[in-house]
Amino acid sequence: MSDRLRLDQAAKILLGVWMAGIVVAMFLVVPQYVGLGDAGRIIILHVPTAWITTVAFAVSAVYSIRYLWKRRASDDAGAVAAAEAGFLFCALATVSGMWFANIVWGTPWNWDPRETTILILLLIYAAYFALRSALDDVERRRRLSAVYNLFAAVTMPFLLFVAPRMAESTLHPNCAFIQGSHCDGIWLELNGARVGQLGDVVLALQGIEQRGDLAVAQVEVRMPGLREVALLTPSFELSSGKPADRPEFPGQQFLLAVEGVDLTNGRVLLNMEAPGTGLLSNSRTFWTFMAANIGFLGLFIWLYRLRADVLLLQDRLARREVAYELPA
Amino acid sequence: MRMGEPLRLVANDVAIEYGARRVLAGVSFELRTGETLVVTGANGSGKSSLLRVICGLQRPARGMVTIEVNGTVLRPSEALHLLGWVAPDLHLYRELTALENLTFFAAVRGMRCNRADLEALLADVGLGGRGDDLLAAYSSGMTQRLRYAYALLHHPRILTLDEPTVTFDARGVALVEQVIARQRERGITVIATNDPREERFGDYILRLGRERL
Amino acid sequence: MDPRVSPQSTVEASTTTAPPKAPLLTAAWAVFRKDVRSELRTRYALNAILLFAVSTVVAMSLGMGPLTTSRNADLPIIHAALLWVAILFAAFTGLARAFVQEEEARTAAALRLSARPTAVFLGKLWFNLALLLLIVAVTTTLFVVMLRVQVGNPGLLAALLLAGSLGLVAATTLIAAIIARASVKGALFAVLSFPLLAPLLVVAIQGSANALAGRGWESGVGALQVLAGYTIALFTASLFLFNNVWEP
């Protein structure tokens, strides 16, 4: 008993020191990035919180299965605690992400696939809590909220499958983290599909011109909040095979680039670029990032177990009141 | 008379709580084929809840009720076909007629009953010729009679009657006596009542008090 | 079997240990027929939903009247989104009724004591599907007529509406059973259903926009596949989870 307590104590201190170290490293170890400035440091906070959100959802679902299986109050407490901690991390990830997006992309919200999924997840958590508060009978509350939790978990794969297909590309750096999301941009052709969508921006290819070594594309751009149609002319260096001129989307801070040209067929590969790609190729950033993931995971586990214990204690106290008919 | 296989209804330490209020603490009993139990007690002593627990319509806070046939304990889904329940809490579909109600309940139980069977059942409970009336037009006494038709439709071996004669006239009381006498030959009866005259039906009497610890 | 049981005494046979278990689909069909009959007699859900659908479409056509294809290339996607929003909200007003009615009229206990949970679920699911298909048919017809929508590929649109309805019913029937046990019912139904319906809505709206714009079947096959997968997954999950919802 006392051994366990001492171990718990040690783990808590270690976690505190670890997290403090991460905060320091976030500002002293992680370098500044071109185009991102200090905003790039948010990767240390934002990505682990977003990741923990999904871990929390899965943990909560597993507890819900266990509850329906064994009907133990402790499993329900675990499911609620994991959902509450997950909701907290979900809100943190959303707010930190919107803040970063506003600074770096010039817009707090653009229905990026990951923005869509985290918003729906936030709504599911909120619905779960709303359901719990609407059920008076304790046993029924536990049972029905566990059912809802699992039912919601069944729809998650569809959301993860559908969301990336809502838009042809993502502004998020490192697409690799999300399966099925297109980082590849979109091919538009003069004689075929001229119109395509990147994020919530609608693009229409109007023409391609060759000027010496440069291929210049004329692209009509429409986006929410933009009154007029804008004409952008990104270009592509044929000899090096790299984008040359990358104009900014009007009113935003992300860029339109031509990443490939097929002059004979009149085809252009268009993509949007946001600063921040390749952030993790810096080893100092990478290791701080990994440490942050471990730290936040530890923080989550500590938080939800603490909350689960409190919930169980509350439940026991309520039962004791029943047994002795104490006035509520 | 046919008794069917030996039947046992066992309540083991059944406790019932409503939120923070405990209405029943640790009731145990055991009944066998042919036996009748009368449960009495003041309002709020948990009589109705105990009957609901027996029928699997309510989950006890502690303990359990088991039904055994031939020594094997039935799963709740198997026990459904053995249980009949009459209670002021029992509501049928008011927008349907009595016959439509009975036809529906027979169909979901997988019974093949024709109209004549159901009309005979209605006549048995004193509702002969009223089968095509909507329940919304039924008086409280007729509603109570229809509850008997609902409960006896599948000839349950365990019949639970909550306030069996409530809203009944003298003929209705005679009907209840007849039902209880017949049930004695078929299986087990549990009656919850406040009427001292009904205590005579019971082989055993369980008196519930306000529980205090 | 007991040799004494004669053919005409089917009722007596039910006193033996193994009572005749109602065939699942027969019992489910009985629940469905009961619900239809009750609904036709009371029109609790029907009147409200149909009037709701009419008001929504009229409100939309009042606001959207001047929009024409020549002035707006995005018209198919706008129309598709509006149509699905109208269907979604009509569904939110009506689809919880089947379970809420049982709890409010307090008939759930009688049903619980007589029918297998799966039969109840299937019966209510069919009833909801019938109700929703009616809603969809009425809403879509009104929508097309009053907003003068040009439907380029009516077959594809019909297929998407059918597949979307199946998914919508598969997702909301279990939730209706859940909220029927809660203290605040109406608002909770939409709150719990919407996040789960998000993938369905996205796919259905995009597919329907293609159908309105007159693109071929190949533009809607992907959407139909996702909707079918969604329906099957949620239906299967509902079958597993419903017992836990229906138990007292």
Image: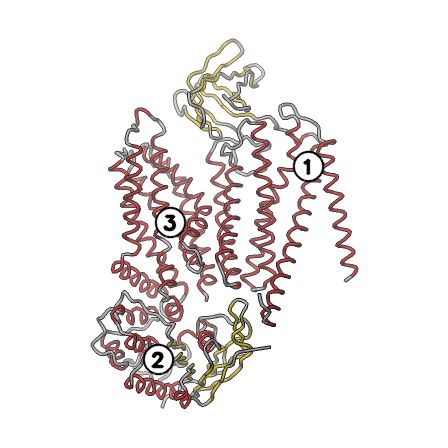
Q: What amino acid is found at the position of numbered circle 2 in the picture?
A: Val
Q: Horizontal and vertical percent for residue A143?
A: 51, 61
**Residue occupying the point 54% across, 18% down:** A246
Direction from residue A62 to residue C96 in the image, left or right:
left
In which image quadrant can residue C70 be found?
Answer: top left
Q: Could you say which disc has been placed on residue B166 in the image? A: 2
Residue for badge 3: C92
Residue for badge 1: A289
Colour logic: secondary structure
**Residue occupying the point 60% across, 69% down:** A326
Both marks 3 and 1 on one chain:
no
Instruction: State if disc 1 and disc 3 touch (CB < 8 Å).
Output: no
Disc 3 is attached to a residue of which chain? C
Structural distance between the alpha carbons of marks 3 and 2: 41 Å
Q: Secondary structure at mark 1?
A: helix
Disc 2 is attached to a residue of which chain? B
Question: Callout 2: 10 Å neighbours few (<14), some, many (20+)?
Answer: some
Count of numbered circles in the view: 3
In which image quadrant can residue C41 be found?
Answer: bottom left
Q: Horizontal and vertical percent for residue B210?
A: 52, 78
Direction from residue B111 to residue A161 in the image, left or right:
right
In this view, the residue in front, C155 or A96, is: A96
Q: Horizontal and vertical percent for residue C62?
A: 28, 35
Both marks 1 and 2 on one chain:
no
In which image quadrant can residue B153 be found?
Answer: bottom left
Residue reaching furthest front? A327
Disc 1 is attached to a residue of which chain? A
Structural distance between the alpha carbons of marks 1 and 2: 73 Å
Nearer the observer, disc 3 or disc 2? Answer: 2
Both marks 3 and 2 on one chain:
no
Q: Secondary structure at mark 2?
A: loop
Direction from residue B116 to residue A84 in the image, left or right:
right
